[in-house]
Amino acid sequence: MATYLEQLTNANTTVTITPTPLIFDKITDPKFRGLYLGLQTFTKTNPQTGEITTLPVAHFFDGVGVRFNMGAQLTRAVSMLRPGISVEVALVELKKNAKGGTTKIYSVTPLDIPRVNLEEMFGGVLSISAPAAEHLLPPPPAPIENGDIINSD
């Protein structure tokens, strides 16, 4: 029987489970197709106020690795799906919102691939966790308006 060290030396890797962002910026961006893995939550703390916010994070498998997206519209849409469903995701509309930003509207369409049992597919070892704060894109700086006092302390 091979020792554990021998097994490690000869073992093959399976899939990358460290999530990378799934980002759509323009309606012309290509559609994404992948396996929906489920929702997890991400807790962030506002450094100015100390307020703690919990946000949902959607995870997908694209055949190579795990991808994540925290967009409110996308996480709301996929929350109706059971993990293991193959989907196509497309950015279909960009709408101005009341906060002066842009809301991304997505189309999420299940594909005609039978639902996958994630336990069997990944050998029961895959446990998806939300991305660490340092892996997220920082929020854009607030615009400076005439008359604002800038403190350089």
Image: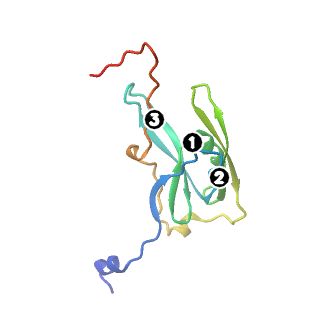
* Distance from Cα at disc 3 to Cα at disc 1: 13 Å
* Distance from Cα at disc 2 to Cα at disc 3: 24 Å
Q: Position of residue 151 (x, y in %)?
A: 32, 19
Q: Which residue is mark 3?
A: 139
Q: Which residue is mark 2?
A: 89
Going by the numbered disc 1, the residue's amino acid type is Gly
Q: Earlier in the sequence, mark 3 or mark 1?
A: 1
Task: Indicate which disc residue 71 carries.
Answer: 1
Please name the residue shown 39% across and 25% down the image: 49
Q: Earlier in the sequence, mark 2 or mark 1?
A: 1
Please name the residue shown 73% across and 63% down the image: 112
Q: Position of residue 42 (x, y in %)?
A: 46, 43
Instruction: For mark 3, give the secondary structure.
Output: loop
Q: Is residue 77 above or below residue 98?
A: below
Instruction: For mark 2, give the secondary structure.
Output: strand
Q: In the rendered image, which quarter is residue 118 located in?
A: bottom right
Please name the residue shown 63% across and 54% down the image: 30
Q: Earlier in the sequence, mark 2 or mark 3?
A: 2
In the image, is 35 to the left or to the right of 53?
right
Q: In the rendered image, which quarter is residue 95 located in?
A: top right
Task: Return the residue found at the far left.
Answer: 153
Q: Residues within 10 Å of mark 3 (few under 14, many from 20)?
A: few
Going by the numbered disc 3, the residue's amino acid type is Pro
